[in-house]
Image: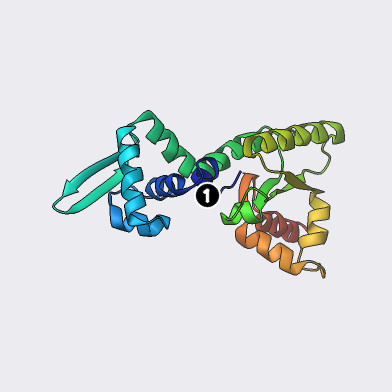
Amino acid sequence: MDFQRPVEALIPGAAGRLLAALARVDTELPISTLATVAAVGRTRASGLIAQLHDLGVVDRREIGRTTMVSLARENVAGELLDRLGHLRTTVLARLQDLAGAIEPLPLTVTLFGSFARGEATASSDIDILAVRPLGADPEKWASTLASFTTRAKRLTGNPVQVLDYDLDELRRRAGSRAKVGRTFWDALRRDGVVLAGSSIDILLENGRVASR
C-alpha cells in the first residue's frame, strides 16, 4: 500500500487528489484553494466537486462568490475516505496488537525505516526489529514471529523484513562499543516506533547498568 497517498492509490486521477486533500483537513476549504493543493485545474475541480456532492461524499456551500467544500464525514463513503486518509495511524495500532501477541513477550518490537518516518510507498518494506528475551524457547519464538510477519504483510500489503536478535546480540551490534553500523542504529533510535516492549535505548541502558 502507498501509505503516503492512500486515497490516490485507490482512487487515481484528479478526483482522488481532491478527496485526499479534503481527507487531510477537518475544515472547509475554498474550492480555489482545494484545486491548488490538489494540483487540479479550477474548472475541472468545480466539475468534480459537483459530481462528488451529488454522490453525498462532499459538502458544498456558497458564501457570496466563494464555494466552500469539505469531506462529508457523516456520509458512510466519506467516513471511509477519512479513515483511508489516516490509514497509517490505523495500521500502527493494528501492528501493536499483532506485536503484543508474539510469545514469549518480546523485549522490543520496533518499527523503523520509511514506514516509521511516514514515508512508505507501495514499494516500501515494513522494517521491524524484534528482540527476543534470553532463554526464549526457539521454536515457539520462531513460530509466533513468523505468524506476526505473515499477518503484518497481509495487513499492509507490503513486504515485511524482520531483524531477529536476542538481547546479547543487540548489545553487541548497537551498544556503545560497537564499531560498525552507527549510522543505521542512530537512525533507528531517532525514527523507531515501539510496537511492543521497551525502546532500544532502555534495553541498552539496562545492559550497561547490569554490567557495572
* Residue at image coords 86%, 32%: 139
Q: Quadrant of residue 185?
A: bottom right
Quadrant showing the N terminus: top right
Q: How is the image coloured?
A: rainbow
Give coordinates of residue 37: x percent, y percent. Answer: 39, 58
Seen in the picture, residue 17 relative to 185 is either above or below; the reply is above
Quadrant showing the C terminus: bottom right
Residue placed most toward the observer, 113 or 56: 56
Q: Residue furthest top?
A: 76
Give coordinates of residue 43: x percent, y percent. Answer: 32, 53
Give coordinates of residue 147: x percent, y percent. Answer: 75, 32
Residue under circle 1?
Answer: 5
Seen in the picture, residue 50 relative to 144 is either above or below; the reply is below
Q: Residue furthest bottom?
A: 179
Tell me, yes or no, if residue 72 can be seen here.
Answer: no
Q: Residue furthest right?
A: 138
* Residue at image coords 48%, 40%: 84
Residue placed most toward the observer, 99 or 135: 99
Q: Which element carries disc 1, helix, strand or loop?
A: loop
In the rendered picture of this protein, how many numbered marks are placed on residues? 1
Q: Quadrant of residue 187?
A: bottom right
Identify which amino acid the numbered label 1 is placed on: Arg
Give coordinates of residue 142: x percent, y percent. Answer: 82, 35
* Residue at image coords 61%, 59%: 191
Residue 35 placement, left or right of 210: left
Q: Residues within 10 Å of mark 1 (few under 14, many from 20)?
A: many
Seen in the picture, residue 207 relative to 9 is either above or below; the reply is below
Tell me, yes or no, if residue 136 can be seen here.
Answer: yes
Residue 87 placement, left or right of 73: right
